[in-house]
Amino acid sequence: MKTGLSDQQPASRPLAADLGDQAIEWLVMLQSGDATMRDRAAFADWCAQSPGHARAAAEARSLFAAVGQTGTARQWKETPDIQDEIGSFRSPVSGTAPIRRQPARRLAVWSRPGRIAIAGAMICALMLVIFGGLEATGPIARWTSDYSTAIGQQRVVMLADGSVAHMNTASAFSVDFSGPRREIRLEAGEVIFDVAKDADHPFVVSANGGAARAVGTVYGVRLEDGGANVTVREGIVEVSSGDRDPVRITVGQQVRYDTDDGLKKITDADLAAYGSWQRGKLIFNQRTLSDVMAELQRYQPGRIVVARDALRGLKVTGVFEIADLDAVFASIEQTTSARVTRLPLLTIIY
């Protein structure tokens, strides 16, 4: 029978010496969704061991209260027996010898600066969830565009001119073929276009203040912060942005532009990895953990936060199934010193 407590702690996750670290680990465990009544009783005993334990628990509670409004956090706050335990933060039992118990699962060993940084990252992530919307497309793009995909969804669209649009996760675009040009307005996400040849009607994808023009080719456009990235699989594409002269890119090349600085330098694209999502896979070759998490962010709701600077630059190489992104997080825990905590709408790597 699962109790939520173990007689021995795993050697790889020793008990944190600092009471503040222990208190935070307790609260993370209690909010995980797996906590039992025995776990909660053990936490109450831990809080009652001394005034120092009570102060540490109160400090941890204030950090979590700032993060506050995920579904699990609300449930935790509203659970009566947890509130009873919180009451013991202020009034630890005196004159008794409480049973010493340890947290059911060791989730981290944090220094005081580390947990403050993590709390700050959690707060920033929560603000992004609240103000940025839960889907990368946002409600306006979803409602106003001709075609869209939800988070984690891919879609193939046959356009009226015979071109084919391969839509990645959380993407949206609109079409206007009424004029001399075949106009596409990319409003969110990423789309790879297999363009039907028509020399009299150029195919133009507009996005974030720039445009990519072709007659018959295969190329992708991906919105990025303040700009877009254009990658060519077949043919030649002319890319323009701002007042600078357009540039032409061909097979295996890509160029980025942004609204402030215009066109960037043309670079080589990794065509072996590019568009791997069309095959249900994500391929990473010596990509930083920060970049990998930014990519995974596009395929699941909520936010992913890498809370330690030392982890962000770690290099990741591997092939992962989009349908099993949990394997990515499992691999991180197995191959690095990082730990992963999953909460509703928030994943923290620390």
Image (cartoon, helix red, strand yellow):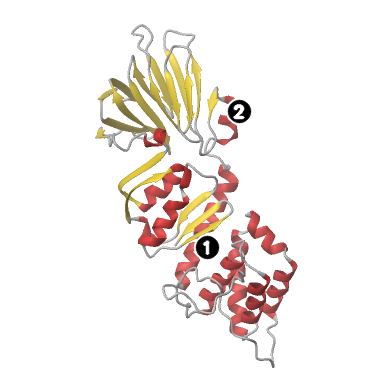
Give whichever of 42, 123 is nearer the camera. Answer: 42
Q: In front here: 98 or 134?
A: 98
Q: Earlier in the sequence, mark 2 or mark 1?
A: 1
Quick check: 199 above or below 238? above
Q: Which residue was labeled with disc 2?
A: 143
Q: Name the residue rendered at 62%, 59% in the picture.
A: 68
Q: Amino acid at mark 2?
A: Trp
In the rendered image, the residue lying farthest to the front is 1
Marking on residue 119: 1
Eye-nearest disc, 2 or 1: 2
- Residue 142 seen in the current view: yes
Observer able to see residue 245? no
**Which amino acid type corresponds to the residue marked 1 in the rendered image?**
Ala
- Residue 293 at x, y percent in the picture: 42, 49
Circle 2 Cα neighbour tier, 10 Å, few/some/many (<14 / 14–19 / ≥20) = few
Q: Residue at x 53, y 28 (%)?
A: 148
